[in-house]
Amino acid sequence: MQLDTIAAISTPMGEGAIAIVRLSGDQAIEIAGSLFQGVGGKKLTDVASHTIHYGHILDPKTKEVAEEVMVSVMKGPKTFTKEDVIEINCHGGLVSVNRVLQLVLNAGARLAEPGEFTKRAFLNGRIDLSQAEAVMDLIRAKTDRAMNVALGQMDGRLSRLIQKLRQEILETLAHVEVNIDYPEYDDVEEMTHQLLIEKANYVKKEIENLLQTSQQGKILREGLSTVIVGRPNVGKSSLLNSLVQENKAIVTDIPGTTRDVIEEYVNVRGVPLRLLDTAGIRETEDIVERIGVERSRQVLKEADLILLVLNYADELTAEDVNIFKAVEGMDVIVIVNKTDLPQKIDLGRVKTLAREHKLVTTSLLEDVGVNELEEAIASLFFAGSIEAGDMTYVSNSRHIALLNQAHQSIEEAISGVEAGVPIDIVQIDLTRTWEILGEIIGDSVHESLIDQLFSQFCLGK
Ligand SMILES: Nc1nc2c(c(=O)[nH]1)N(C=O)[C@@H](CNc1ccc(C(=O)N[C@@H](CCC(=O)O)C(=O)O)cc1)CN2
Ligand SMILES: Nc1nc2c(ncn2[C@@H]2O[C@H](COP(=O)(O)OP(=O)(O)OP(=O)(O)O)[C@@H](O)[C@H]2O)c(=O)[nH]1
Ligand SMILES: [Mg+2]
């Protein structure tokens, strides 16, 4: 594929030890060579591939030294984009790296769009779409486990599975075709039906298995949305601080301290949590606090896990009971906090209200019970099973949506065969399933979708 030469800063925009301007395309080496002055006059166009060279970038107009650099020269196709790639390693700092980028653009490169390097890796056949999406997940991974899922997908784990299923469908279609072409055998119709049902059920089951990993996959990717709720002053913000092991949320003895929802990511025994501290729920005249309480109620609805905090040193109130009602049917851990103070709460009643939910007592002030709470969170979710390293997880909502569609169309094919629908109609459903699965790996996707996906990447990636 013939594409123009692109360039961008591939390191974060800020102060760093080193910053990289990356170029990719036919003209990459020539453009960099026109600006580079190496030791002893060596030319980038003459050097061996996959070598790095010390020298200076000169402004061609003034002949002045713009930067002291190391330049990597990598000739395609053994590069990330499969094109010629140049990486100019500059001193960190925005001015220097921007100056080099400007010179590179003046010398004939075009500023890359966000994700355009990875898009080229895709267009040139190095990676498929689900692998490219994994690159993005990798950058955004917030925990080790999320990163491992992304690495697995980048490695093509999901792609291989999808390809296997597509191959299965293709072979089935071919088989059916042959049977139709030789209808002189008596039992051909019977055999075709049986084969179709068998194969389609296999594919359906595999799709279901994948979809089953999607909840955990999504949790690994985005973190388990965990909302801390409770009346004012029970210790919700103290709990957030204790779990993230930092004073992120303001804690005071004034009820109504937290007004807005506070969000923090934390890894609790390998379970990635997106932890949300909320304003204490109560009736209030204070306008700001009231908005806060309303927000608390809203985030509650989208939670995967509720940490419901009660005060050990206070009697249960109607508000506490209301909060129990608001979280009915959700995954809840009940935390009775402030056990260092004299007991006023009726624990028997708490147990009745908590029903099957886990109950943990804590004194956040004295750091008691936090271990038990972490244990409860971990056991509630992965039950250790996530450790199984070579699982394939589906975590991307685009993939999940496509798998659901594929599942529906394969079901239609199966019920079609069972209802005695003509084979050519069934073939259409199977072909459709094959196409939908292809969209996951980018085999049959529209260009606008590809553009949209890659535009979500960082600039320079
Ligand atoms: N400096 C730098 N670091 C980087 C990248 C980069 O582009 N530049 N990457 C960019 O995201 C990642 C590494 N990803 C890469 C993937 C494949 C190839 C590559 O050239 N593969 C060839 C050659 C392998 C070989 O030497 O045999 C190939 O598979 O054909 C390079 C980088 C992370 N670190
Ligand atoms: N004695 C005791 N005090 C605690 C404990 N946990 C928290 N506190 C104190 O209780 C007060 C309220 O704690 P916060 O964490 O701000 O409570 P909150 O639920 O976030 O309160 P709002 O944001 O107002 O809803 C603070 O003075 C904390 O230091 C505990 O286990 N024991
Ligand atoms: Mg608070």
Image: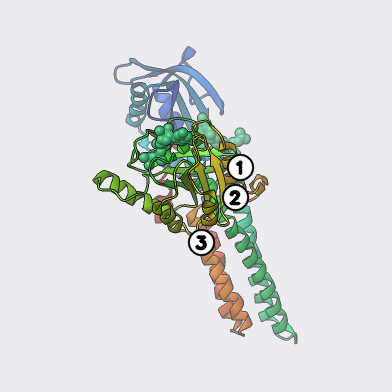
Which quarter of the rendered picture does the C terminus lie within? top left
Vertical relation: 19 (above or below) 152: above
The colour scheme applied to this rendered structure is rainbow
Q: Depth check: 115 or 134 in front?
A: 134
Give the quadrant of ligand 2: top left
Q: Is mark 1 within 8 Å of ligand 2?
A: no
Name the residue at 62% across, 67% down.
204
Q: Which mark is residue 380?
A: 2
Question: CA separation, marks 3 and 2?
Answer: 29 Å
- The three-letter code of the residue at mark 2 reads Leu
Question: CA separation, marks 1 and 3?
Answer: 35 Å
Q: Is mark 2 within 8 Å of ligand 2?
A: no
Q: Depth check: 126 or 278 in front?
A: 278
Q: Depth check: 73 or 409 in front?
A: 409
- Give the image location of residue 192, x and y in percent: 69, 79
Residue picked out by circle 3 = 402
> Residue 55, can we see it?
yes
